[in-house]
Amino acid sequence: MSFRQYLYAIFFACVSIPLLALGIQQFFFAKETLENRELVSKLSAELVGREIQSRLEIARTVVESAANKLAADGVKDPELLNSYLKDLVVKVPYILNIHYDNTKGRSIAFYPKINKEGLSNIGVDHTTRDHWKKIQSFNTPVVSDVVKAVGAADVPIVNVIIPARNKKGKLVGYAVCALNLNRLVDNATSRIAPGEFSIWVFDSKGVPVFTTDLVATLTPYLKPQEISRVLKTGGEWVTIERGNAADLSGYLLPLPDQNWAVGIFRKVPDKETEHGVLVWTNILFFLLVCLLTLIVGSTVNQVLVSKFKKLMNSVFDSKYPWGKMDYIESPEEFGHLQKLINKLSNQVRPNKPEANDINFAVEREFHRRISDFSERGVILNKVFDDFLTGLVLVDKNGEIRFANKISRRLMPMAQPGSDFLCCLDQCFSSDVPPNEWLERLRTQLTFIATGEKYELRMYSIKDSGVVDKVYVLVREE
């Protein structure tokens, strides 16, 4: 192999090995990112489910209050009942309407009294409605299936109906509430920012009750058996087929007592697309670097060969300065150059043992210091990770660089590269707006899961001219 070929081989080795290592690192980083997204999808679905369930419970409590009012006062004063219903609607923004029915299924009090067509809602017969049929069968509080554009409603609704009985157990009538599903789910998901994800709520038939997906229509995207399986298993990953639009994949879990399922979804091809983009980006980058290597290698090779020829001429003829014709033309001239270099090497060789001893001593001391520094770094990292107080290091972009063990326990999503404020907002609450939490030296927070009080303390550090922040979560006794 010629000198030029050796030179090119060295250049390619120097370029290929780091690029290969970088490509492998990027692959595992992309894999970890996708796994984190799936975890966020699952946790977000659970959060949305809890929020929707809590609002349904609030609505049910409101209807129970209305039923107790009817049981206590009876049906003698409809105007007083209407006034009471109005006060209830004002307190819960996702209640579309609320009314009292007598034992024969006709409304005796209704808020609002007039529907959008200008017709009175008083005296309307509800015996043909789904919720009336169910209450006659079970005679207990009932939450109906999804209803669309019926009577006073022009949006998807769900009815909550509770019988009102007086102290003697006699049936006085029914309290009925219609919930605006779009408004209810939108209210429940107002604090969720899924970004590339979309939120879906399905009924027991696989029809979307609510979705943030812009291309969605209210047609069954999931088969009833899929919904039934999710309701039985307690949650699983499913795929939504949307015809011409890209299919969606996400985690779907049941909503207790409602036969609904809540899920967070993203486009199915995204995984393959991201891996493909990563592979092709690395290939193109590698080819570009190879091209640049050829250009640079050729240039450097020409310069080195030129300088080498001048050096050979100088050594061979022992004259200076060199002339334009002082070039080596035959292999024999290279042999003469080799003999001269060997003679020079023999002159330097007596000093070689001493130089080797010095180099060995310096190398040994260098490795000793590196080993000592690495051991201390591991010890310090272990000490910080085992702190009994939450410790998080955040860079200037608000991303987590280090979180110790207790911080990761309080905030499961607190991994390197995650947004610290988003992690806090998922797990803590405060009277202070979230956008001010990281700017204050001390902020009082409440751990949502247990109600424990914590104090978030902020300290600034400066490393190589870059100011980072250390946040400490201290539990208040």
Image: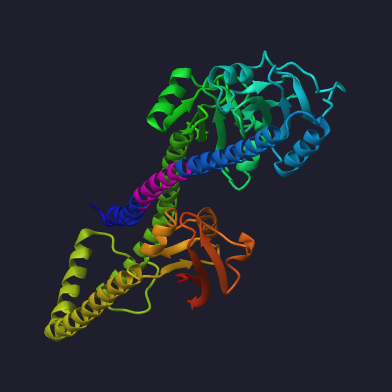
Q: Is residue 326 visible?
A: no
Q: Which residue does the image show at 40% across and 51% down from the upper left?
A: 294
In this rendering, the answer to whether 114 lies above or below 60 is above
In this rendering, the answer to whether 90 lies above or below 219 is below
Q: Residue 341 appears at what percent x and percent y?
A: 19, 73
Q: Quadrant of residue 361?
A: bottom left
In this rendering, the answer to whether 172 lies above or below 424 is above
Q: Is residue 246 left or right of residue 149?
A: left
Is 312 in the magenta? no
Q: Quadrant of residue 107?
A: top right
Q: Residue 430 appears at what percent x and percent y?
A: 59, 61
Q: Is residue 49 visible?
A: yes
Label the magenta part by its dominant secondary structure.
helix
Q: Quadrant of residue 429?
A: bottom right
- Read off the magenta span: 22-41
Query: Residue 59 or 393: which is nearer the viewer?
Result: 59
Query: Residue 225 or 184: which is nearer the viewer?
Result: 184
In this rendering, the answer to whether 409 lies above or below 368 is above
Query: Residue 99 or 14: which is nearer the viewer?
Result: 99
In the displayed orientation, state which residue is furthest to the top: 128
Query: Residue 25 or 424: which is nearer the viewer?
Result: 424
Q: Is residue 145 left or right of residue 88?
A: left
Q: How many numbered marks, from 0 up?
A: 0
Q: Residue 8 appears at what percent x and percent y?
A: 32, 53
Q: Which residue does the image show at 84% across and 22% down from the upper left?
A: 120
